[in-house]
Amino acid sequence: MRLLVTRPEPDNERTAATLRAKGHNVMLAPMLRIEAVPNVDLGTPPWSGVLLTSANGARALAAHPRRGELLALPVLAVGRASADVARSAGFADVSSADGDADDLVRLAAAHFAGARKPLLYPAGEDRSRDLAGALSAQGVVVHTVVTYRAAAANEFSAAVQTALTQNRIDGVLHFSRRSVDSYLLCGRTIHQHALAPMHYCLSERAAEPLRVAGAARIAVSPQPDEASLIARISP
């Protein structure tokens, strides 16, 4: 199939490599650009552990000057991709919730029940889930630090726009609601062409704007992870 991957760099390259190994033709159209927040103040330790809702949080800690004092902390990651990045950054005690933010909340509430020290959460500027609020309600304190932000694209590249208007894209992979919003904004002048392919979405939340916009062909991953999403794609 001829596929368009909309997730940000550098994760889009990994996704593209997986798809190409399965025989697909892949184009990249990152709908978000991840920007680290420079010299962010992590706050005052000690912490009980680290929470990760994305690989971007792990990368932010890996590049932080205080990285060394964090590596001994246990890490709870939302999924395998963020867990793998954390391990690559040097964290040894890493567990994955293998799901979404709700799964991470359940895992953290069980793992850190009764903890007296807060959890460190390197977060993005825009968040769809109040992780700190959800865990606070269960007696777990979270110290949230904005370590990165996602800047939305406002137009397709000429190559992507041409491929869509000439119906040379069979399917589009979407990994977040915000990237879907950016995709629809970029496709505003070629609305029907942008909606025409099959849209493979990581979650129902990501799929919702596409349904509202009138997309007729949407497939939602049974689990919120890359492997499950790719498994939805027809050979």
Image (tube, rainbow, N blue to C red):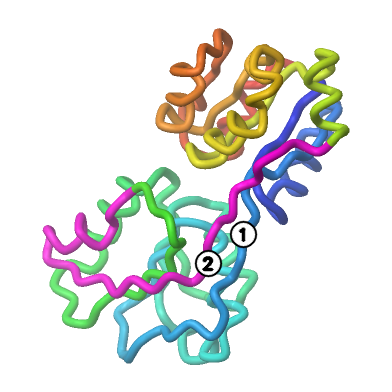
- Can residue 1 be seen from the camera position used here? no
Number of marks in picture: 2
Horizontal side of 232 relative to 78 (left or right) equals right
Nearer the observer, 80 or 162: 162
Q: Residue at x 66, y 33 (%)?
A: 186
Q: Residues within 10 Å of mark 1 (few under 14, many from 20)?
A: some
Q: Is residue 166 magenta?
A: no
User: Could you give the CA–CA distance between mark 2 and mark 1, rounded to whole angstroms?
Assistant: 7 Å
Residue at point 60%, 48% (across, down): 152
Q: Is residue 79 visible?
A: yes
Q: Nearer the viewer, residue 6 or 136?
A: 6
Residue 142 drawn in magenta = yes
Residue placed most toward the observer, 163 or 233: 163
Q: Using the image, tell me which numbered label, if any, was put on residue 148.
A: 2
* Whether label 2 touches label 1, CB < 8 Å: yes
Looking at the rendered structure, the kind of residue marked 1 is Ile
Residue at the image position 62 percent from the left and 80 percent from the top = 63
Q: Which residues are magenta?
A: 129-157
Position of the C terminus, as image quadrant, is top right
Residue 175 locus on image (x, y percent): 56, 38
- In the drawing, what numbered circle is on residue 34? 1
Disc sitting over residue 84 in the figure: none
Q: Secondary structure at mark 2?
A: strand
Vertical position of residue 73 compared to residue 203: above or below:
below
